[in-house]
Image (cartoon, rainbow, N blue to C red):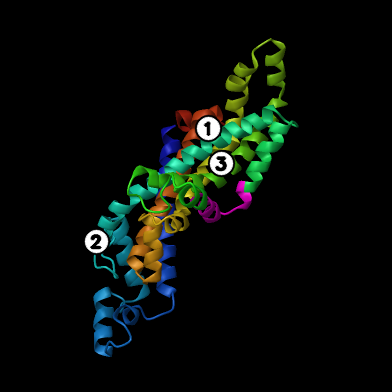
Amino acid sequence: MGRYVIKRLLMMVVILWCAGIVIFTMTYLTPGDVPRLLLGAQASSETVEAKRAALGLDKSYLSQLGTFMVNTFVKFDFGTSWATNTYIVSDLAERIPRTLILGLSAMVLNVVLGTLMGIYAAINEGKWQDSLVMIIAMLFVSMPDFFIGLLLMLLFALKLGVLPAYGIDSWTGYILPILATACGGMAVNARQARSSMLEVIRADFVTTARSKGQKEGVIIRKHMLPNAMMPIITGVGGGLAVVVAGSPVIETVFSIPGLGAYMLNAINTHDYPAIRASVVFFALFASCAVLLMDLCYAFLDPRIKAQYSKGKKVKDK
């Protein structure tokens, strides 16, 4: 089991390195004279060249890439923002908790409600309850997060006046963004859970359990759900990364000063160090989500435990 974890951690390192190289190359190849854009059109050529040298943009691609990789992954130093001249680490430390609160809360909500909805629909296959759950799921899947957010804002903030439309002055400011973020994932999880449960319902071991007179609740909890969890975990792992990576749109709609809004502002101001730091964090979070998914696989699937136990793989006979 330890070898399995070490292997996945090494994969995380490779993924982060690749993400760093890709985002650096993309910003390096982006057209436009950044020093000129930062100083304005009225700046003299000497001032622009001095700014270019101060930012290290007068060096070659490989030299800049090497400096970026060493500073980021060895020294853990993201540098200073070109737009605000503040330490990027300080900006990230202030904004990341808000993004994590939004993303993780939405993920917990859509996993719990989506899985329960899918199980409920599968148990009532072909009935009106099944149709109702699938209609709701299709509606949420078809609508983008920002559109759902605007609808929630119109209803609960403008019409009813019970929740704030923007900002996070209090904990109630997180409610609408979390709901808007969770709806799409909840619909996806509901459909996935329904499909997985329907496959398990028709399995022989479920029929055997029913023939032994076990209660339906016990069959669902002890027999159906554990065997249906593998596809659900796959969707949850991918959805967790998508929820946080999609935070820029929701944070902009609800004026939440999180990492997503920070990255969008950095893009608008050509603040490449801030862009690179934001993308590296999103890659780190996505890698952690995949690692968590793999560990759940290893915990639920005895074949993975056997494969990495005793330091050798189990070969099929």
Queried whether the magenta region covers residue 141, the answer comes back as yes
- Residue 288 position, x and y percent, is 42, 44
Q: Which mark is residue 186?
A: 3
Q: Residues within 10 Å of mark 3 (few under 14, many from 20)?
A: many
Q: Residue furthest top?
A: 213
Mark 3: which amino acid?
Met
From the viewer's perspective, is residue 102 above or below residue 220?
below
Q: CA distance from mark 1 to mark 3?
A: 29 Å
* Residue drawn 72% across the image and 21% down it: 204
Q: Which comes before the other along the chain, label 1 or label 3?
A: 3
Foreground pick, 74 / 152: 152
Name the residue carrying label 1.
304
| Magenta stretch, overall SS | helix
What SS does tag 2 mark? loop
Q: CA distance from mark 2 to mark 3?
A: 37 Å
From the viewer's perspective, is residue 119 above or below residue 173?
above
Name the residue carrying label 2.
87
**Of labels 1 and 3, the one closer to you:** 3
Judge from the rendering whether residue 190 lies leftward or rightward of residue 199; answer left or right: left
What SS does tag 1 mark? helix
Q: Residues within 10 Å of mark 2 (few under 14, many from 20)?
A: some
Queried whether the magenta region covers residue 29, the answer comes back as no
From the viewer's perspective, is residue 31 above or below residue 137?
below
Magenta region, residue range: 140-153
What SS does tag 3 mark? helix
Mark 2: which amino acid?
Tyr
